[in-house]
Amino acid sequence: MKLTRREFLRRGGALAGMWTGLSQLGEPVLAFLRTRGARWPWYRPDEVRITYNYCDMCMWRCGMLVYTVNGRVVKVEGNPKDPKSRGRLCGRGQAAVAHLYDPDRLRKPLIRTGERGTWSFREASWEEALDRAAEALARLRDQYGPESVAWFAHTTGDFWFGDYLPLAFGSPNVGKPATGLCLTPREVAAQITFGRGIGGHEPVDWENTRYIVLIGNHIGENAHNTVMQDFARALAQGAKLVVVDPRYSTAAMKAHRWLPIKPGTDTALLLAWMNVLITEGLYDREYIEKYTVGFERLAEHIRPFTPEWAAPITEIPAEVIREVAREMAAHRPQVVIPPGRHVVWYGNDTQRMRALFILNVLLGNVGRRGGLYLPRAPALDPYPHPPFPVEVAAGGCGAAAVGIRIPDTPGHPPRADGVGSKFATGPVVIQELIEPMITGQPYPIRGLVVYGVNLFHSIPNVPRTIEALKRLEFVLAIDVLPQEHLAWADIVLPEATFLERYDELWVASHRIPYIALREPAVEPLPDTRPGWWIARELGLRLGLADYFQWSSIEEYLNTRLMSVGLSLDRLREAGGVFTWPGKPYLEDYGEGETPFPTPSGKIEIYSEALARAGFDPLPVYEPVEEPPPGYFRLLYGRHPLHTFGKTQNNPWLAEVYPENEVWVNDEMAAALGLKNGDRVLLENQDGVRSGPVRVRATPRIRKDAVYLVHGFGHRGSRLSRAEGRGASDNLLITRYRLDPISGGAGMRVNFVRLIREV
């Protein structure tokens, strides 16, 4: 559809704010946007109503100002008082207006009339749909126990269906893609090493750093707003940058060194860097003596892992490895190796993250300016409620690893994801809840509630997920858009978008602890409802009224705010955000205080807990499987205008980047008789094929790998713009290696070959 100037003005000019996230996309995209720029504002200031929100276009939760004129949202901007957005939004955030007015949105509750896997539904009233859903859930609970129902939840509104209602219901089987399919190894490694998690916002002190090493960290393509701002500022201030990546990424374009590492060998590189720092005496001796335990054992452990040992493994020259280690040491403590977010790569990921954290520790940067700061969160009380029947929840970004072995709590149903047998510790991992639906082991899961999770773009091994869906007795889905997994639900409940609803407060663990408000800018689309309302109505029907004693969401929020001396009105008066002083540096802690709540009260380089549980107490390198002849390792990542599988249908974002491409080394493409723009199918090692996708032949990727942007290739949805566009990386991920410590699913162990489309 051609976007005219008149249409652009009607939509509110939101594309004009995309510059931060789009600068790397090149002059053609910027020219496209310039031709559609509009003078602002086109309305009278006295017509405008401004409300406060935090963005749901990705998981970053940037503070947002929402401008409404005559009952219609016309513009969104970053909230200048928000410590994350600081008055700016990325391109995805600006496109929230198009998300709100997407004509494909779900508009009515739906009840299945035909077999699962088909779009055979009839429209229903909310009363009927809620009654039927509650009846089905109650039957499963009463007949098989609350643990027989699993709850999958994602997006920034997942509190109601990923924490509160499932725990009141009594199920321990609550999975979020953000754990086992993203950051669990990072959080478990941080808990083991520091006694505290990293949290949702990677705590890098960008403004003071002088040397940055990115290892598998795609800044500029994952486009987290705050990181983009801070990273650009750090480079402008003269910070040096090293990028370790099999692909010449956007960040690599800004680097003074690009190290095109062989996929799967990152831990070997980290160990070699440690070797140089220790054997050459370049580590921060005073810091190590004051804040850590176990260094002597590390020094002995690290001896064999020289740059000469690592060079043939990583395919990075030994002298380059040594030079980078010396450069890092020369800049300490204002040097940082950020931990990244999506860290489930090869199945040995907790040990890799331990190695990354210990390398930072050797440089003396944890809790120091220019390194990794120490985040804190405000301490708000929960809304008063009776004790939950279970204590184990899905866990968010900062979920604590409870020891190294998690015993079953007496009187509580055990988790079904295999903790204590398949893997040792950590929050529930979503992918391991699929097998009990099929095999009934350790006990059958018979029902599923899905909130905001596209099952076919999140969980590896799609055929296995489909088999599980066939066997379930009941599936309830709550969503905004008609994603393809909804065709497998028995009841579908349409949720209002985040611009149309109140939600739980955002309580941020950050350098500056703060809370942020989400409030409705406009009334919900007729016959859609906010998630909190849906959860409460289901809870009341399930006999859980004691957990939902509040009569309105405003009462709920005000009660929570009262615990810190605030109210909704005062939060609005403060600009939708309220901050507290943080304690980001070690110097902020007094005598006898420790920011490291480990058993020793210090950073634990050597982990006694891992040793007792039978794991290596110091990081080790494990070789990974090589691609079979004729196959490439499948790598995947993000695009700055898209989030997971949820934004490909956005009218504005789809116009700028409608489908992904497969990156192939140009020499390998030529050997296969392929050129830019050719369409191919990708077939993995198990014979699973993607839809057609265009070739991008480029020298910017190694010869042994190909690369896809994640989230495309929707098949079987009712998404008019996303359906059939590009290839799904998740469809091709039919295998994964389970991390034995944390349960993370290492997914970069799949291989594909290219078949020309006929």
Image (cartoon, rainbow, N blue to C red):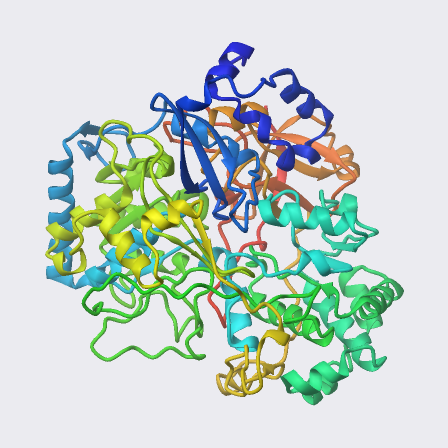
Q: Is residue 454 above or below residue 696?
A: below
Please state the horizontal and vertical placement of residue 636, each as a whole percent of the image: 60, 46
Please state the horizontal and vertical placement of residue 737, each as a whole percent of the image: 52, 61
> Residue placed farthest to the right in the image?
319
- The residue under the point 69% across, 20% down is 31
Please state the horizontal and vertical placement of residue 125, each as a whole percent of the image: 14, 32
- The residue under the point 39% across, 63% down is 395
Q: Quadrant of the C terminus?
A: top right
- The residue under the point 73% across, 72% down is 271
Residue 536 visible somewhere in the drawing = yes
Q: Quadrant of residue 264?
A: bottom right
Q: Is residue 273 above or below residue 568?
A: below
Please state the horizontal and vertical placement of residue 621, each as a whole percent of the image: 66, 71
Lateral position of residue 716 relative to residue 469, left or right: right
- The residue under the point 15% across, 35% down is 126
Q: Nearer the viewer, residue 242 or 500?
A: 500
Lateral position of residue 581 relative to residue 159, left or right: right
Residue 467 visible somewhere in the drawing = no
